[in-house]
Image (cartoon, helix red, strand yellow):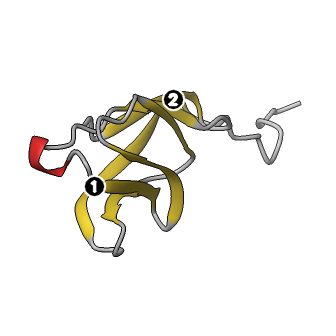
Amino acid sequence: MPQICVGEQQTEPCEMRITIHVPQHAVDNEFCVYADEKQLFCGTGILPPQTVLLKQDSWIFIKNTRGDVVYSQKLLVKWKQKEKRKRVRDPWSLF
C-alpha cells in the first residue's frame, strides 16, 4: 500500500485507491477497513479496489470481526498546490 496520498489542492480531499490482498488461509474471514476510527468498508475474500478520500494524515487499520487489528499503516497527505494565504496588509509604498 502506498504511504503518501498526493492531492491537487489543499481545499480538496486527496483521493487514493487501495487494494487489500487477503492471504489464502484467511480468504473466508471477514475484514473491515478503517481510516482512523471511521469504518470505510468491509468484505470477505478478495476485496475489490476501493477509493478512499483523505483530508489529513490518517491511520488505515484492517480489523477482523472480533475487532483485532490485523494490519495498520499511516498514510501521509500531501498537496501539489498549497492553500494560498491572503495578504494581511497592502505592500509598502513611499508615496
For the N terminus, which image quadrant?
top left
> Of tags 2 and 1, which is closer to the observer?
1
Mark 1 secondary-structure assignment: loop
Of 49 and 88, the residue lying toward us: 49
Q: Which residue is mark 2?
A: 7
Residue 4 image offset from top left, x and y in percent: 33, 38
Give the residue at x 40% y 35%: 5
Give the residue at x 46% y 56%: 35
Give the number of marks.
2
Mark 1 residue crowding within 10 angstroms, few (<14) / some (14–19) / many (20+): few
40 above or below 85?
Answer: below
Residue 12 image offset from top left, x and y in percent: 65, 34
Of 95 and 70, the residue lying toward us: 70
Q: CA distance from mark 2 to mark 1?
A: 33 Å
Q: Is residue 60 left or right of residue 73?
A: right
For the C terminus, which image quadrant?
top right
Dot 2 and dot 1 residues touching (CB under 8 Å): no
Mark 2 secondary-structure assignment: strand
- In the image as oriented, which residue stretches furthest toward the front? 28
Q: Which residue is mark 1?
A: 29
Give the residue at x 43% y 37%: 78
Residue 66 image offset from top left, x and y in percent: 34, 75
- Identify the amino acid type marked 2: Gly
